[in-house]
Amino acid sequence: HPMADSNLVAIIGQKSHRDVARKAVRESLVLLKNDNNTLPISTEFKNIVVVGKHANNSGLQSGGWTIRWQGVKESYKGATTILEGIKNLAQGSVIYDTVGTENHPDADVAIIVVGEDPYAEFFGDIGDERGSCSFYLKESHQEYIENYKKQGVKVVTILISGRPLIVTDQIKKSDAFVAAWLPGSEGDGVAEVLFGKYNFKGKLPHSWPASEDDFKGKFGPNFWDKSIKPLFEYGFGLQYKEAS
């Protein structure tokens, strides 16, 4: 841009900027479910399993308009992933299962990170032939949750997405479920809330659909349309010490 000041490049990503970004992440996370006070996670757990490529990929955490128009599917310099944030706080062993097929029945908890691939503008439109977006999680991501649930491990699911998705079954199968949206470069912010360093503050900016039928209208369930009962109402969001 002709008006840009190249002298300011050196301060991009400085600590004060990252602190603000991390605070924004912490305060935007929405806790949708927390059965039996599964969260916060104890720093003293001996075995924590972190599952899924989205857990350790800042490009996938960031969505579109990051680095490039349609975003990137690989990590970029200067970011912290959710896995790195968890490792920074956990005192016990942290095992990373990239593809969600491993067996760890002795784990204290499985933190399963699932979500959408980056997109921008019409490439993100569900049903657009130029993209591959869906109302639902990829089958492989659904299987992550199935695998650890079958092992009897407590499941905390973190959803990375730019919008509400139809994850009704996955919420039922999870002990705790967090809508993390697109936390960008600050995976530490997600971990800080998961471990109880901060409480959840986020509330839903849009009603959450229960099924594809909710999208018969243009926008899915909304607070002004009382004919559709969403899975979660506009403004919903739990905090620690509340029952889900």
Image (cartoon, rainbow, N blue to C red):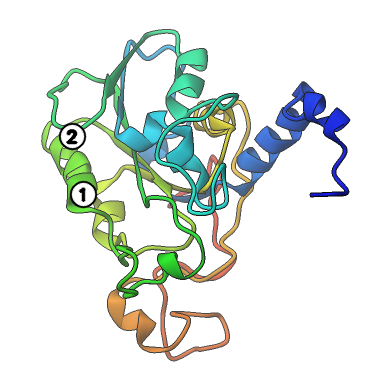
Query: Which residue is at a point 68% across and 42% down the rendered structure image?
Result: 24
Q: Is residue 189 above or below residue 47?
A: below
Residue 213 pos. (x, y %): 30, 82
Q: Is residue 6 above or below residue 35?
A: above
Query: Which residue is at a point 32% across and 65% down the rendered structure image?
Result: 166
Q: Is residue 137 left or right of residue 81?
A: left
Residue type highlighted by circle 2: Tyr
SS for callout 1: helix
Q: Nearer the viewer, mark 1 or mark 2?
A: 1
Query: Which residue is at a point 63% across and 32% down the rendered structure image?
Result: 198
Q: Quadrant of residue 134?
A: bottom left
Q: Which residue is mark 1?
A: 142
Whole-angstrom CA distance, mark 1 to mark 2, is: 11 Å
Q: Which residue is mark 2?
A: 148
Q: Quadrant of residue 196?
A: top right
Along the line of sight, which residue is nearer the eye, 48 or 100? 100
SS for callout 2: helix
Q: Is residue 35 above or below residue 139?
A: above
Q: In this rendering, does residue 230 appear at all? A: yes
Q: Dot 2: within a 10 Å radius of its alpha carbon, few (fewer than 14), some, or many (20 or more) residues?
A: many
Q: Quadrant of residue 57?
A: top left
Q: Is disc 1 in contact with disc 2, using a CB cutoff of under 8 Å?
A: no
Q: Is residue 125 left or right of residue 213?
A: right
Along the line of sight, which residue is nearer the eye, 130 or 227? 130
